[in-house]
Amino acid sequence: MAIKDIMELDIFKIITRSVTESNNLETMSNQSAQLLVGTLGIKASAIFALNPETEELEHLASFGLSVDYLNKGPIQIGKSKGWTSRKEPIAIKDVTKSDMLQYPEQAVQEGIMAIVSIPILFSGRVIGLLRLYHHDRWDISKNDLDTLSVLAEIIGMAMMYSRIRSALHSVKDTVSEVHSVWLEP
Amino acid sequence: MARQKILLPYNFTQYDRKALDFVSRNFLKGEQNEITLFNAYIPAPDIDLRGSPIMVKMKGQLDQLSKKVYEQKSALKEAKQNLLQSGFSKDQVHHIFEPVKKDIATSIIDQVSKGNYDVVVLNRKPAKITRFFTRSVFLKVVEALKNVTVCIVN
C-alpha cells in the first residue's frame, strides 16, 4: 500500500505563517508544536536546540508530552545509534523494534509508537531538532519528510533571528546602564 | 513571623519542582503565609479556516487543540496538591493559570505588581544554549522587580 502524504500545502502555509508572524521565539515554537499536533493528528511535537559543546538537546518548546516524559533526563544526540548523518531526518516507525532510542521504556510508557526527527539546519549546521511523536506505527512519506525539512529550516532561521535580536537587546541594556557622567570628558 | 504573600512561577520543569520543594520546606512555618502558583500558558493560535476545505475538515482537530492547551491547568493543580500534602491549608495555596501576555517574563512581572507579593521564588537553570535564542526569563524578571524579595533556587 502506498504511503499517503499528510503534509498538505494549506497545513504548511498555516504553520509557516505562525513562524514568520511571531516576534517571540517562545510563542512561535510553542504554537508551531501545537499546530503540528493539531493539523497532523499526531500525539506530540517538540522543538529542541542543540548544545554543540555537550551535544545535548535542550527543550525549547513542546506540545502533547507529559511533564514526566520531558523530565526523563538529558537527550544526547550522539547516543542515538545509527544516526550516521545528523543532517538527515530519521523516522522510527516502531519504537518497540528500534535500538536507536536513548529512553525506549519511557517512550512506550508515554504511549509513543513512532518518532520522526528532523534536524533544524542553519547555514548547513545543525542547530536543533524538530521531533514528531505518533501514538501509532507511522510510515511517513518521503514527500512529508521533505516538507517537514523545509519547515525545520524556516524554524532554524527564526531561531537565529531571535538569537541576534536577543544579543542586540543585551547590548542595548548594557549601553543603557552607562551613566552620562562617565561619558563626559 | 509576619504574613507573607509568595508568588511561585511554575512551568512544570525539574527546576520548578525544586523551587516547589524549597517553598514547602521554608514557608510552611508562617501559618498565615499565602502561596500562589502561577503559570502563563501559550494559547493555541487563532487560525482563519475560511477558504481552505482541508483546514475546514480539520476544524474539529484544531478545536481540540485549545482544549488540550487548557489541560495543562490540571498539571498546575497537581503542583498545588503537593503543597497541600506538605502541610499548607487550602486557604494558603492558590493557583493562577492565564494566557501569556507579551512574553512569560512580562506576565510574571505584571502578576507581581498586581498581586502585591512580598516574595517571588524563581529558579535558575544551569547555563543553557537556549538562553542564546530566548532572553532569560530569570534576568528580565529580576531586573524589573522592585521592593520585592526574590528567592533564587539554583
Image (cartoon, coloured by chain):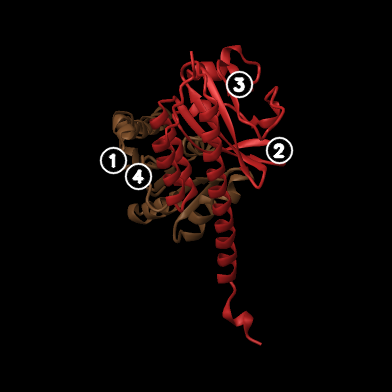
- Mark 1 residue crowding within 10 angstroms, few (<14) / some (14–19) / many (20+): few
Q: Nearer the viewer, mark 1 or mark 2?
A: 1
Marks 3 and 1, how far apart in space?
A: 43 Å
Quarter of the image where one finds residue B87:
top left
Mark 1 — residue? B51
Mark 2 — residue? A54
Mark 1 or mark 4, earlier in chain:
1
Mark 3 — residue? A103
Q: Amino acid at mark 1?
A: Gly
Q: What shade has chain A been given? A: red
Secondary structure at numbered mark 3: loop
Q: Nearer the viewer, residue A24 or B25?
A: A24
Secondary structure at numbered mark 1: loop
Measured as percent of width and height from the top left, residue A149 is found at: 56, 36
Mark 4 — residue? B99
Give the answer, above or below, for where B106 lies relative to A117. Answer: below
* Host chain of mark 2: A
Marks 1 and 4, how far apart in space?
A: 28 Å
Q: Is residue A156 left or right of residue B94?
A: right
